[in-house]
Amino acid sequence: MNPISSNHPSLVNASTQNQETTAPRKETIAEQKLAEVTPFSTVSQQARELESMQQELRSLPDVDLERVNQIRAELQQGTFSVDLDELAGAIFSTHHSE
């Protein structure tokens, strides 16, 4: 009889541990979702472009004060004029596109 049998506790544990470490591991749902995400470099580039555009928009004034002051001065002087054809075209194109 072999002095080391397969029923020996240390051999059974070693055998079980070896099976656990070599068995293929199933991916978790989180890992599967992560694999589906757009590559970081693509997102990062898009994020940089978006941030740049947002900063540019933030730097623009809400109102063109220079134009407001110009119209105000023309109104006070009585020299303000409206091109009715241009106005009608702008109104038409605004409502026609809807």
Image: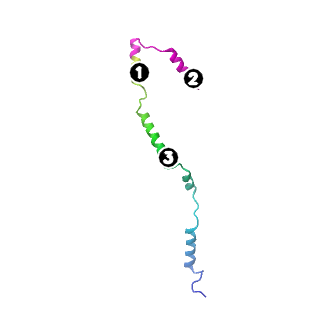
- For marks 2 and 1, the one nearer the N-term is 1
- For marks 1 and 3, the one nearer the N-term is 3
Which-is-in-front pick, marks 1 and 3? 3
Main SS class of the magenta portion in the image: helix
Inter-mark Cα distance, 3 to 2: 38 Å
Inter-mark Cα distance, 2 to 1: 25 Å
Q: Do callouts 1 and 3 mark residues in contact (Cβ within 8 Å)? A: no
* Magenta residue check for 46: no
How many residues crowd mark 3 within 10 Å: few (<14), some (14–19), many (20+)?
few
Name the residue at 38% across, 16% down: 73
Residue 3 lies, with reference to residue 41, above or below; the image says: below
Q: Find disc 3 in the rendering and name its residue.
A: 42
The label number, if any, that marks residue 68 in the structure image: 1
How many residues crowd mark 2 within 10 Å: few (<14), some (14–19), many (20+)?
few
Name the residue at 42% across, 37% down: 55
Inter-mark Cα distance, 1 to 3: 42 Å
Q: Position of residue 20 (x, y in %)?
A: 57, 69
- What stretch of residues is rendered in magenta? 73-98
Quadrant containing the C terminus is top right
Residue 26 lies, with reference to residue 96, above or below; the image says: below
Name the residue at 45% across, 42% down: 48
Q: Find disc 2 in the rendering and name its residue.
A: 95
* Magenta residue check for 75: yes
